[in-house]
Image (tube, coloured by chain):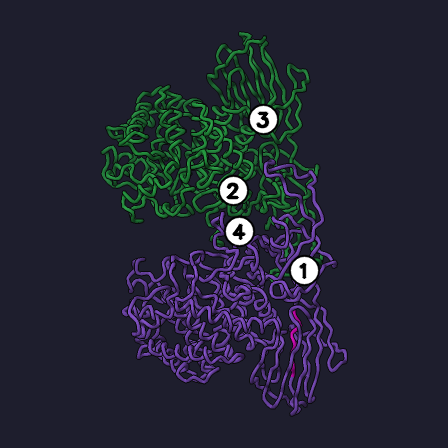
Chain colours: A green, B purple
Amino acid sequence: MQVYTTPKLNKVKVTSDFWKRYRELVVKEVLPYQWKVMNDEADISISEDPQNNGQDKNSHAIANLKIAAGQMKGHHYGFPFQDTDVYKWLEAAAYSFGYHPNPDLKKITDNLIDLIADAQEDDGYLSTYFQIDAPERKFKRLQQSHELYTMGHYIEAGVAYHHETGNEKALEIAKRMADCIDKNFGLEEGKIHGYDGHPEIELALSRLYEETGEKRYLDLAHYFLNQRGQDPAFFEKQIKADGDSADRDLIAGMRDFPREYYLAAEPIKDQKVPHGHAVRVVYLCTGMAYVARYTGDKDLLAACDRFWNDIVKRQMYITGNIGQTTTGEAFTYDYDLPNDTDYGETCASVGMSFFARQMLNIHAKGEYGDVLEKELFNGALSGMALDGKHFFYVNPLEADPKASKGNPGKSHVLTHRADWFGCACCPANLARLIASVDEYLYTVNGDTILSHQFISNEAEFDDGLKIVQTNHFPWSGDIHYEIENPNDKSFKLGIRIPSWSANFDLEVNGQAKDLPVEDGFIYIDVDDKSLTIDLKLDMGVKFMRASNRVSDDFDKVAIQRGPVVYAAEEVDNQAPLSLYQVTPSDQVDYHFDEKLLDGVGVVKVAAQRQKIDDDNAPLYVDATQPVETESADLTLVPYYSWANRENGQMRVWLNK
Amino acid sequence: MQVYTTPKLNKVKVTSDFWKRYRELVVKEVLPYQWKVMNDEADISISEDPQNNGQDKNSHAIANLKIAAGQMKGHHYGFPFQDTDVYKWLEAAAYSFGYHPNPDLKKITDNLIDLIADAQEDDGYLSTYFQIDAPERKFKRLQQSHELYTMGHYIEAGVAYHHETGNEKALEIAKRMADCIDKNFGLEEGKIHGYDGHPEIELALSRLYEETGEKRYLDLAHYFLNQRGQDPAFFEKQIKADGDSADRDLIAGMRDFPREYYLAAEPIKDQKVPHGHAVRVVYLCTGMAYVARYTGDKDLLAACDRFWNDIVKRQMYITGNIGQTTTGEAFTYDYDLPNDTDYGETCASVGMSFFARQMLNIHAKGEYGDVLEKELFNGALSGMALDGKHFFYVNPLEADPKASKGNPGKSHVLTHRADWFGCACCPANLARLIASVDEYLYTVNGDTILSHQFISNEAEFDDGLKIVQTNHFPWSGDIHYEIENPNDKSFKLGIRIPSWSANFDLEVNGQAKDLPVEDGFIYIDVDDKSLTIDLKLDMGVKFMRASNRVSDDFDKVAIQRGPVVYAAEEVDNQAPLSLYQVTPSDQVDYHFDEKLLDGVGVVKVAAQRQKIDDDNAPLYVDATQPVETESADLTLVPYYSWANRENGQMRVWLNK
């Protein structure tokens, strides 16, 4: 019997041209830009941000920390969770040191750790809004306070910073925060038997457990998950005790959302489908997946599976975007996927990537890799302009500047990326995902290494084991692996066969090989000193349709090539785009244009375009009379790259 | 040369079965029900009204008048314009006396006139909110106060009541109100150089001018129209002077709408297209059409033509509904006609009927009759259930109970008619239209009588001239006229050829006749003692499409027969309705079902229904794979009659 080893992954170096460009952009543009913004030194406008919620000033995020640290005088400004902009930025910076050492930036971040340490209270508490302007209200209005959410984001940043740089102070702050939370929350008498309105602390404590091995942190995460919804009236009771008046609300209007919105109407194990705020849902799910894996809690695992299934099979746009409505940035209901009023928050796609990554740790199923890939190349990536300095909060699948301006039901849909946002959760969230994408390429489960993403990289494991993946993905589907295994270890390499590539060719050491696809993976036994694998994925342009339960996409098609979903933009075509009717066929033109949009694959599909009706013609006419049409190609570019040129219409779902 | 007479219309008796049913319903159900509601004696719930704006109590409308009259103690309750519910009801009652004398009701209405007279102040002012709770703020916040709107509605009621019953007191109240307004508004020094936020007074004063011949009232109406927008900052200045704080707003949030919303951003003559609140627009247009006709003001006439053209050709649903967005109950922009987030307020369709009627007085164009007919048989009529006791405020063209419940962007769309509304403008507005439909059948312009509606009636003119129209419209298109002209007068009879009936047959005195259609009318010279006319309209079932500028209706069809637009309901078909793809063809089944929905024509069209995709299938699949379909008829009922049975999906625009 074969004795398998358990490989340990040490380091992944991303060599993909596509991702190196984005990762260097994070270093050169995104991080410096966001640092200036948070220090109120950038010349930005957030007035056009449809989510600005009345915020019309700068970020003030660093100033809030300085005031809390006693280094400045003044009041808190911004949302109660304004601190998290800093923490997510810090986390992104930490990851960037792993691939791009940067002593100048490191000075800034080391100093920032000092500032955060100074702002932290003796008992570990840190949430600048409460420290500065409402110290008597700490932990008293958790539905809205985001205190644990805020500290959770620091904990993530502290873990990452410690992990990348070895800075002990960064980890110490995180541990003191967690200890503070542990002291205040739990089932014991005298503690708050509650939890935060916005999940995050659960996944953060899990990461702290991973970094420190301290089981108390995992137990605390587990407590928060189990306690959720046990007393459905918990938030209302707290609000009543804290002063019921709406004037005392920390975020106006938040009290109006029902308990379901906060995932607090019943214990998680009883919740059939995810409700409410999309980011809350996927952060919660990520925390559940961590804790389920470490504790074996079957109820949590079942909830993960249930929520995953509902989101992915019934509430996810083809781009991976989730959260259909602007009202509360929330899920609506199964198969309700309107394209032009979609919310599809960038943060929700980032969070979905977290969830997918954690699910891969639990089940070796290709669908998690599929969704992760979908987010990386579409729904999440769309959140940032190619210049790294403009951002989408909302990611629509159909947009029209006239509609965004003229129909209030679409006013949340920007047709160009904004400088910044009043609620600036998305930009740094996406930055930390891009900067840590190396951590999303492999999953090691026992004797099996799953290679589930086709992002060129060099991965080093222990015992000298090395996997080098080379490709020009997502433009090419030719995936080449070179494996060095100098110590003749035996293990399995699982390679994901994406759902978009039913057909594929495989060669191992130059020999064609026919392997079965098991739950989305093929498995290759490795025990030789070296091995080459060549996988050819099906990069044909695909005409996709939605389940016919989705009435908004009925009789429409979307174009996909590899993992990349395509969009038609007005700048490449003749508006209105609704007049094109595409003809699914094999005769599709694809070419890579290295000059366009920093290098993208461009798709041209055959279409008929209706002659536009006269502006003064009757609005309703006999439908049996023929309408004049002409042949016209429709040009499409990757969805993630839209809105980087002239402002105009865009649509993913095309008329047939 | 023929010498033509100018016929004078004395009386129209509606004999149409279809309309008699509705008009008797007004007498038997609608008026008694609404009277009980306004007296807070009905067992109703307005909690489910998505427009309830926090109103959760009863109407209080009569109580407000009693308090203002000193007959009761208490505070005002409801909107500042709560009085108008009473006035519109009174106006409907007045019309009903013309076709259904009703001494019991007459006692109530006479007493109501007395109550209103008691509530009126010595100087003619009457708006109970200000009298009871804010006497110092009269006319000081006109953007929101609705004072002139409120008094305008009384003036309309007073004119109608006087006209129908000869009650002088009713007219006296109206005149005193108008005098009060005249004393307070105008260009003279010391008067307010302003106007109401909600147009209505302009059309009301025009009607008062018609009833009294007092030119001062016409001049005052003209003043309001000319003054509108002359100082675009008028409302803001008033608000500043009245106390800028939002706490002092009369209706929360109304200050946030831009000047365009109030049709106050520039003088009317400079406004290119109508903006803002749909009801405001059509009330303003109605007033403009009155005043343009009586004064010859070419700027106002041009504005009427311009606004009409934009609404009808670019912003009207096929049902006649207008106002595309719930935000401010407003127009959005040209060709933006979403079906499932539509607002389409019943009042806006009622107001559009007013506008159409007045335009017929100006131009003898069939399109005004077409639109009036569209409203009468579809968009306006849909506002009331067949029982006369349930009402739609919002009239969608596509509805799904799941969507109304689950997607906040559609929460304004009820899928069943409500008992009543916090803002209860629609029920009595529709009642007064139905009760006065006899006034909408003929337009006399000089020597020409236009018969523009096919609603059976007997019309008496002076000199013994009588026109009797007999038909079973809208179910049959056979229209029979008998004309008695005992004094051999000479005049022209114009009969509208509806735009939906390009083909028609005409016989005059049994002889086929071929007459040209001029601007939507055929003209018959009448000078014999008697004449019969038989017109056969094309009642074929029509498959209609929208201009392809309307992206929401692209590649969709709607079914129309005669003026009646059809809707598919879940109760007659298999949900989801989106799976049906209809096939335009001549083979359409139509039958009249006298038992269904109080008697309706039912249409069945051939369709293919897609087999519904599995609930657990992937959400996105290869579009080139065939989808299983089966033949299935789609059954449709008249749009106005939907939502009178089981709650379920409905759609007007069908997939092809």
Q: Where does label 3 land, which residue? A: A472
A184 displayed left or right of B21: left
Placement of A234 over or under B426, stated as above or below = above
Along the polypeptide, which appears first: circle 1 or circle 4? 4
| Residue at the farthest bottom position | B487
- Real-space CA distance between mark 3 and mark 1, rounded to the nearest whole angstrom: 58 Å
Q: Earlier in the sequence, mark 2 or mark 3?
A: 3
Say which element carries label 2: loop
In this picture, is A15 found above or below A193?
A: above
Question: Which chain letter matches label 4?
Answer: B
- Residue B603 bears which disc, if any? 1
In the picture, the disc for residue B401 is 4
Tell me whether marks 2 and 3 sit on the same chain: yes
Mark 4 on the same chain as mark 2: no
Is the same chain shared between marks 3 and 1? no
Q: Are marks 3 and 1 in contact (CB under 8 Å)?
A: no
Query: Which chain does tag 1 point to?
Result: B
* Number of callouts: 4
In the image, is residue B497 part of the stretch drawn in magenta?
Answer: yes
The residues colored magenta run B492-498
Q: Quadrant of the N terminus of chain B?
A: bottom right
The type of residue carrying mark 3 is His
Under circle 3, the secondary element is: loop
Say which mark, if any, is on residue A515. none
Q: Report crowding for label 3: few under 14, some 14 to 19, many 20 or more residues within 10 A (C-alpha).
A: some
The residue that mark 2 highlights is A643
Q: Which residue is nearer to you in this view: B102 or B62?
A: B102
